[in-house]
Amino acid sequence: MINFILNTESISTELPPGMPLLDFVRDNKKLKGTKEGCREGDCGACLILLGEYKRNKVFYKSVNSCLLPLGEVNGKQVVTIEGVNSNKLNLIQQAFVDEGASQCGFCTPGFILSLTAYFLNAIEIKENEAISSIDGNICRCTGYTSIIRAIQKLCKDFGLHIYSKNGLDPKPNRLKLLVDKKVLPEYFLDIPDRLHKISLNKKVDSKIPKKSPVFIAGGTDLYIQKPDELSTENLVFLSQKKKLKKIWRDKDRIFIGSMTTVEDIKSSSIIQKLFPETEKYFKLISSTPIRYRATVGGNIVNASPIGDLTIFLLALNTMVVLNDGKKQRELLLRDFYKGYKQLNKKRNDILEYIWFKKPNKNSFFNFEKVSRRKYLDIASVNSAILIQYDKGAVINIHLSAGGIAPIPLYLSKVRSYLLGKEINSEIVKEASRIAQSEISPISDVRGSNDYKRLLLRQLIYCHFVTLFPKEVNVDELL
């Protein structure tokens, strides 16, 4: 039995847990404000708010309902556009009307809910962050200028002073504030108590079924590939295993649970301290609603040759820890891939967590990605590097690249060549030539063989120009 709250209604259903929430909302509950668009998590027309009771309050995030299985909303609240409607337009809806930010209206519900999630979660209101919060929503006819005007109007109305610096414990209460400002209906104030009661009765089955289980992490790729099949599969939702969702440090090692989301990693103080450019890197990795669902474990096990997070982690010489229910084993991430979509993994293995050593003070890191669009697009080629450079020599180095082989590739020949070398333009040029001998790109919709080879060369150049501008001369590379 799946129990949750849909707007104000308490739901108990025995429908298949693998059923996409979008279908339940539209077909079973006839809430047509949630639109069916791309069914790939790209357009945001199906976006809903998902509220989860934690630490005595409800935390909301924007999620694409087309990629969200019904079983994942057990014990939570689902908010559709109907759930924020009142007798009058709320503050966000009115701003869209005032600024002409809605034309056909098909995409508008998703925009309204994305901005609602932003105002619920923002530590302080910043115009650029409010605009970024709609990065998972596409408007095909209105144009974004009027939408941006509406956002600017809202940010000015809310102001910075009404929020505390601690967004996790806002004063005044964030939920009450939005109710008072007519952004949310008053029933939202009762949701924490209602979800708390559901959570007391919710039973979580942590056992792994023996009959051909299908493990679901974030599901952001699986539900694009085979949503109909998943509706009838024997699913195991790994999100119920709370111990798999955390980031921690132990001495010189950084650990990340496999169910940690991309957004969790992006916002982690541990990760931000190690990699100051984290915000910039992760803006290149999908949209906000996808980052709220996509997990590090899912990204690794999906084995996409261009998985951004996998390429990032390969350059950190990451270890993966697997458990088949009887014993645990660990191996290097670069040894996890045996061929295209082929893994060094048994069927019942669960990727529990990953770990990598904390880079020392003489280490430098960089991540680069080229795609047809700068943001919200699949990479043509991506690459990451971690290099330890001291006293004029490369002490250690790890370099990865995607889109140029059947697997996410660790460039071992380049590493062997650069160890012990002094960095200069000629050394970098030779390293890029060696890289060409390690790769085997194919021509596809993201570029030809020759184009991808050129991109990798340029990304290697970019790593060294970015990290060592005094040692590497751009003109000498060309």
Image: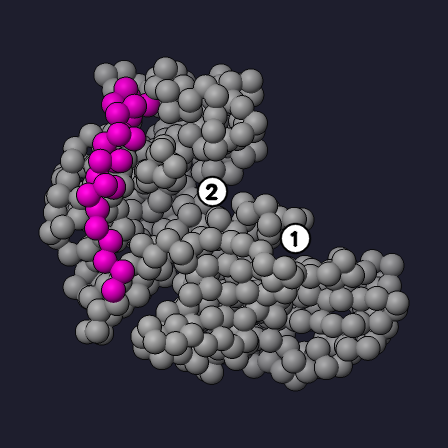
Residue depicted at x 20% and y 66%: 234
* Dot 2 crowding, Cα within 10 Å, few <14, some 14–19, many 20+: many
Q: Amino acid at mark 1?
A: Phe
Q: Position of residue 9 (x, y in %)?
A: 16, 33
Q: Is residue 11 left or right of residue 77?
A: left
Can residue 49 be seen in the rendering of this structure?
A: no
Q: Is residue 115 left or right of residue 24?
A: right
Please give the residue where the numbered disc 1 appears in the rendered image.
275
Whether 270 is drawn above or below 194: the answer is: below
Up-down relation of residue 276 to residue 206 (above or below)? above
Q: Nearer the viewer, residue 211 or 464?
A: 211
x then y, percent, for residue 228: 20, 62
Spatial separation of the CA atoms under disc 1 and disc 2: 23 Å
Which image quadrant for residue 425? bottom right
Q: Does residue 41 show up?
A: yes
What colour scheme governs how the chains and residues are painted in the rendered image of this protein?
one colour
Q: Is residue 77 above or below residue 162?
A: below
As drawn, the label of residue 194 is none
Q: What residue is at 87 percent from the left and 59 percent from the top?
A: 470
Label total for image:
2
Q: Residues within 10 Å of mark 1 (few under 14, many from 20)?
A: some
**Whole-percent x and y of residue 381?**
57, 66
Residue segment shown in magenta: 184-207
Is label 1 or label 2 in front?
A: 1
The image position of residue 422, as x and y in percent, is 86, 72
Mark 1 element type = loop
The dot on residue 135 is: 2
